[in-house]
Image (cartoon, rainbow, N blue to C red):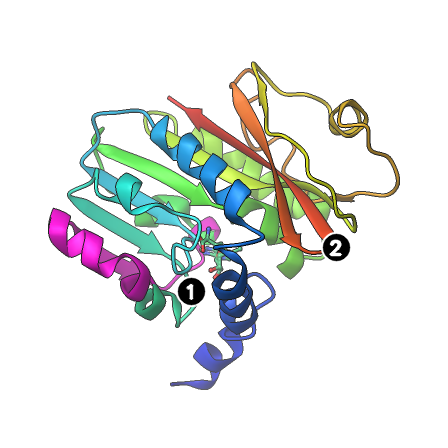
């Protein structure tokens, strides 16, 4: 393994720490979150054979049932451990459904069109990655500009995303909330009966405002709650 790959094992958005946390929490602390993500995936626009996953990591948050809908799956993620662990988690199910799996080690947002095939028959899913971009960037304007470009770049494609919207150092069991369109972050927090200081993940404008969405609370750690936004654009 080369030095660049090694450093990615400790990347702020994925890598060893992420995998260790996912392994420990997915059947316990994360269970309510993963069940809601699974329901969101069940609502994906139908009729696609090819799936493009951006930042899937090992697919800790993805269900076999969802992945088995596709004949080919392209995963774009620079984490060198992701393909091995993805195979460990989903390999048996994908062998049963005979899906072809391809990995691309790249930063999707540097040149999105490079990684998308032509044609209608492609569904693109951003897998909890948009809300992580701020970790490797100094500038809110830069992250928001990269995200704001995506809806135009993907016009003509069906696509979806689940991503961190806001997070705070609290432990709180909150229900998922279905919204017919965008809701201001402060209003969302106060509607949940919460206050205090929340971290903004700079994704508030990623999904076009008129798109219906679900807000999924995610207790990432015992004392860290994320509000994840999930929606489909078609
Ligand atoms: C929080 S993890 C996502 C976890 C994933 N949803 C799962 O089910 O396990 C974020 C992932 O996004 C990847 N990532 C971060 N920036 C990326 C980029 N610019 N392009 C592609 N993948 C990226 C990281 O390597 C990491 O695996």
The x and y percentages for residue 205 are 62, 30
Q: Nearer the viewer, mark 2 or mark 1?
A: 2
Q: Nearer the viewer, residue 119 or 225?
A: 225
Q: Is residue 97 magenta?
A: yes
Q: Disc 2 marks which residue?
A: 223
The x and y percentages for residue 157 are 32, 29
Name the residue at the right extreme: 196
Q: Earlier in the sequence, mark 2 or mark 1?
A: 1
Which labelled disc corresponds to residue 158?
A: none
Would the CB of label 1 be found within 8 Å of ligand 1? yes
Tell me which segment is drawn in magenta: 86-109
Q: Is residue 33 visible?
A: yes
The structure residue drawn at horizontal position 38% and vertical position 85%, both measured from the top left corner, is 1
Q: Quadrant of residue 79?
A: bottom left
Q: Is residue 116 visible?
A: no
Name the residue at the front extreme: 28
The x and y percentages for residue 200 are 74, 42
C-alpha gap between disc 2 and disc 1 = 28 Å
Q: Disc 1 marks which residue?
A: 78
């Amino acid at each position: 393994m080369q030095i660049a790959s090694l450093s990615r094992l400790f990347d702020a958005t994925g890598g060893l720490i992420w995998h260790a946390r996912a392994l420990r929490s997915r059947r316990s602390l994360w269970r309510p979150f993963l069940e809601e993500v699974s329901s969101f995936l069940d609502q994906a626009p139908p009729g696609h054979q090819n799936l493009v996953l951006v930042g899937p990591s090992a697919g800790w948050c993805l269900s076999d049932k969802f992945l088995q809908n596709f004949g080919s799956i392209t995963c774009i993620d620079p984490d060198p451990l992701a393909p091995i662990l993805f195979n460990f988690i989903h390999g048996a199910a994908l062998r049963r459904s005979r899906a072809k799996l391809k990995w691309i080690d790249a930063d999707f947002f540097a040149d999105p069109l490079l990684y998308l095939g032509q044609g209608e028959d492609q569904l693109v899913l951003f897998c909890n990655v948009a809300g992580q971009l701020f970790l490797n960037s100094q500038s809110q304007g830069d992250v928001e500009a990269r995200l704001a470009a995506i809806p135009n770049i993907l016009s003509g494609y069906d696509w979806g995303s689940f991503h961190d919207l806001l997070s705070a150092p609290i432990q709180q069991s909150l229900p998922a909330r279905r919204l017919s369109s965008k809701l201001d972050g402060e209003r969302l927090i106060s509607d949940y009966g919460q206050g205090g200081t929340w971290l903004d993940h700079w994704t508030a404008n990623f999904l076009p405002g008129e798109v219906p969405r679900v807000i999924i609370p995610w207790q990432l750690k015992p004392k860290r709650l994320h509000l994840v936004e999930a929606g489909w654009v078609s």
